[in-house]
Amino acid sequence: MNNADTVEIACLAQLINVIAPITTVRNGGLFRQAIYHPFHMLSKYGRGTAMKAVVDAPVYSSVYGDLKIVEPAVVYQEESNEVHLFVLNCEEKETVELNIELSGYGDLKVKKHLTLCGEDYEIRNTVEEPDNVTMKEVKVSGEKCVELPPLSWNVVILG
């Protein structure tokens, strides 16, 4: 989304099995892998006009250089007058407070916050336990601030 000015379409090569977001099991059964949820949320909430986000966040160093701890993508839906934020929090141990400043959209406030996170990074979905890893709704204050759990992927709806 952050490169929508140069990339017009993105697609998922495989829908099921191997490296896919949906896995099937011989003789019946299927379950969603963790990667299913970001694709689903982007498909559901990522429609509209991609906007450029400006982020003031700490950085961490990697072999690829310095990277921001918080990586956002933003979409504006004119029909519903909503701003949809997709935010990756790369901080490993601490919750990050995300203060949202919008210019030119009126007085929009946080309506919904969904997060994909957890404390056990080894947990997996299976046919027997298909919802071990799933998006969870977080209580919101109705203001312009949300808390991003450590190592989380988030959807924040403002309206």
Image (cartoon, rainbow, N blue to C red):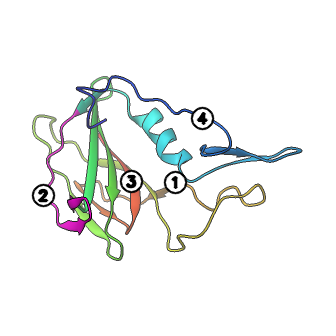
In this rendering, the answer to whether 23 lies above or below 143 is: above
- Give the quarter of the image for residue 104: top left
Quick one: SS at disc 2? Answer: loop
Viewer-proximal residue among 10 and 39: 10
Asked whether the residues under the numbered discs 4 and 1 touch, taking CB atoms below 8 Å apart as contact, a structural biologist would say no
Q: CA distance from mark 4 to mark 2?
A: 36 Å
In front of the other: label 2 or label 1?
A: 2
Q: Which residue is mark 2?
A: 56
Alpha carbons under labels 4 and 1: distance apart: 22 Å
Q: Does residue 66 show up magenta in the picture? A: yes
Sequence order check: which comes first, mark 2 or mark 1?
2
Q: Nearer the viewer, mark 4 or mark 1?
A: 4
First in sequence: mark 4 or mark 1?
A: 4
Q: State which tag comes first along the sequence, 4 or 3.
A: 4
Amino acid on which the number 4 mark rests in the picture? Gln
Query: Which residue ends up furthest to the bottom in the rendered image?
Result: 93
Query: Residue sitting at 46 percent across and 33 percent down?
Result: 43
User: Amino acid type of disc 2?
Assistant: Asp
Q: In whole angstroms, how far apart are the C-alphas of marks 3 and 2?
A: 18 Å
Q: Which mark is residue 135?
A: 1
- Provide the residue designation for mark 3: 154
